[in-house]
Image (cartoon, rainbow, N blue to C red):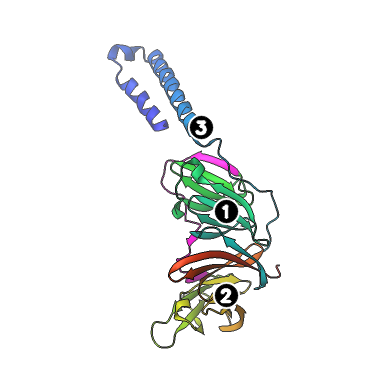
Amino acid sequence: MAGACGGIAALVTAAATPEVRRDRGRRDLAAGLVVAVVCSVTVAGTARQFYSAYGAWSPAVAEQVLVPDLPVSVGAVAYRTRLAESPDALLKAGAGFVIKTGSRLIAYGGRSGKVRWQADFSQIGVKDLDLSDISQGKVAGTDVLRIRVGAVLFSLDEITGRIVKTEHVNDDSNGPSALKGFREELRDLRFGDGGTVTARQSLKGPRVIRLDYRADLEEKPKRTEIQVVDAGFARPNLERIGGHVVVVASPANLYEVDPVAGNVVGAHTNPCAPDGETRLYSVPGAFVVWCRHFEATAISHDEIVGLVPRTR
């Protein structure tokens, strides 16, 4: 808008005749006043259209709470939350996690597995949120989810769901996407000491998942191999917990690995049914397992299982 207004002013000045230029001071002042009035009316109109479209909409918000610590060990099953619809993605955020289903974002408490807040963007005409339009950031020190809807950017408090900022944006970028879909494989994991754990599935010989830990690019990797019991569970999927990594390689067990030492330190019961698929997330208050169950080839239902261990 500023560029357009500047262009109008330039055209007015350029169109002045030699006679007008002799009285340039008065003519420039008049042109400037005309441009200012036109631009202020245009900007005000745009602002009214923008805020009238979304100003009355608000998520169903929650109270402000302290964010629980991240888990440092795998605990026992504290809850099973069966979901009414199969989500597209899950994100560690706020006091637990957020799932995305179509045009809705639903936040859950990590310790309780209960809904905290919801934002239904279908109420403002959105049929389906694109994962690439959702990212995380900060507004005045508050952790927020940034959701782009057309040319509008909403910033929602991760803990309460409250809208802390609404702005009009002109560019197409919204930062890196915060959400990962269920089918996306997690193969590389940054570790607390700056090292990297990389998971690979063997394609020849014994069915194993290999975890390679590197403190830096120059170092020879420390390798841990886990036998795959069922080829259907060989899709690399791992998550960090405390100083260890947990990986899915069996319909029955979650394997806990010390990547620095290069050995398996324990096995935990996989809370998902053998006919399902498993995704792992370390979120505030719990180590959660996203279970997707099937009947024949169709999705039966999804549930989130919260394993609540001791926290630091």
Residue 123 among magenta residues? no
| Depth order, front residue of 279/151 | 279
Q: Is residue 285 left or right of residue 50?
A: right
Marker disc for residue 245: 2
Q: Is residue 170 above or below residue 259?
A: above
Secondary element type, mark 3: helix
- How far is disc 1 from disc 3 in space, using C-alphas? 25 Å
**Residue behind mark 3:** 52
- Residue 102 x/y as whole percent: 48, 53
x%, y% of residue 306?
Answer: 63, 67
Q: Are marks 1 and 2 in contact (CB under 8 Å)?
A: no
Is residue 52 something that shows in the picture?
yes
Q: Earlier in the sequence, mark 1 or mark 2?
A: 1
Q: Closer to the camera: disc 1 or disc 3?
A: 1
Q: Is residue 96 left or right of residue 220?
A: right
Which callout, 3 or 2, points to the residue nearer the camera? Answer: 3
Which segment is the magenta one? 163-189
Q: Residues within 10 Å of mark 1 (few under 14, many from 20)?
A: many
For the question of whether residue 193 can be seen, the reply is no
Report the residue marked by disc 1.
Answer: 106
**Residue 181 location (% of width, % of height):** 47, 62
**Residue type at tag 1:** Ile
Alpha carbon of mark 1 to alpha carbon of mark 2: how far? 27 Å
What's the amino acid at mark 3?
A: Ser
Q: Measure the C-alpha gap from mark 3 to mark 2.
A: 49 Å
Say whether residue 113 is left or right of residue 216.
right
For badge 2, the amino acid type reads Val
Q: Tell whether label 3 touches label 1 (CB within 8 Å).
A: no
Check disc 3: other Cα within 10 Å, few if <14, some if 14-19, many if 20+.
few
